[in-house]
Amino acid sequence: QVQLVESGGGLVQAGGSLRLSCAASGHTVSSYRMAWFRQAPGKEREFVAAISWSGWSGRYYADSVKDRFTISRDNAENTLWLQMNSLKPEDTAVYYCAADAGWCSGYGCYQRPTYDYWGQGTQVTVSS
């Protein structure tokens, strides 16, 4: 069983940056695809970014965060990150880390919320 714990959220002004971390435990996630999703109040959970097990074969971003957010991972540390720059008020949400061992190919697959393991989330609030 994989446990995921997010950290790094907080309150930041528009234009600022935050770096989210997701620490995995219970099982190595080095062969798992991983992703970040977010959910704003009153809205459905939405895809933010995803990364293949190696980090080299695929990184995927939602259009709304492309060129501002960067997903990365360190398999030796069992850790996933999301560097968020040029933050906007519309980025305000609870951000969730997710992991899955299943095979997946292409953006259409990675962006679906069909991951087996989820963290509890970390709040990101961007003030205008």
Image (cartoon, rainbow, N blue to C red):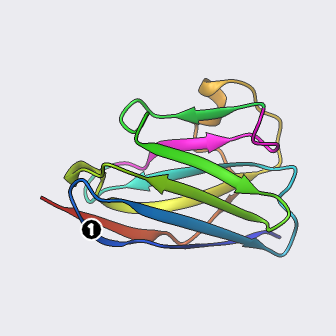
Instruction: Please indicate whether residue 7 sits to the left or right of residue 24 in the image.
Output: left
Is 22 drawn above or below residue 88 in the view shown?
A: below
Instruction: Please indicate whether residue 38 sits to the left or right of residue 58 in the image.
Output: left
At horizontal 20% and vertical 54% (from top left) the residue drawn is 89
Residue hosting label 1: 12
Is 104 drawn above or below residue 100 in the view shown?
A: above
Which quadrant holds the C terminus? bottom left
Magenta-colored span: 44-56
Magenta-span inclusion, residue 50: yes
Q: Classify 10 Å Cα crowding around label 1: few (below 14), some (14-19), many (20 and above).
A: some
Q: Quadrant of residue 49?
A: top right
Is 25 drawn above or below residue 38 in the view shown?
A: below
Residue 10, x across and y down, in percent: 35, 74
Q: Secondary structure at mark 1?
A: strand
Residue 22, x across and y down, in percent: 62, 67
Residue 116, x across and y down, in percent: 71, 55
At horizontal 53% and vertical 45% (from top left) the residue drawn is 70
Which quadrant holds the N terminus? bottom right
30 or 17, nearer to the observer: 17
Total marks in image: 1
Magenta-span inclusion, residue 102: no
At horizontal 75% and vertical 42% (from top left) the residue drawn is 55
Instruction: Please indicate whether residue 8 sits to the left or right of residue 113 in the image.
Output: left
121 or 9, nearer to the observer: 9
Residue 62, x across and y down, in percent: 45, 34
Is 74 drawn above or below residue 88 in the view shown?
A: below
Q: Amino acid at mark 1?
A: Val
Instruction: Please indicate whether residue 70 sits to the left or right of residue 41 in the image.
Output: right
Q: Quadrant of residue 104?
A: top right
At horizontal 42% and vertical 50% (from top left) the residue drawn is 45
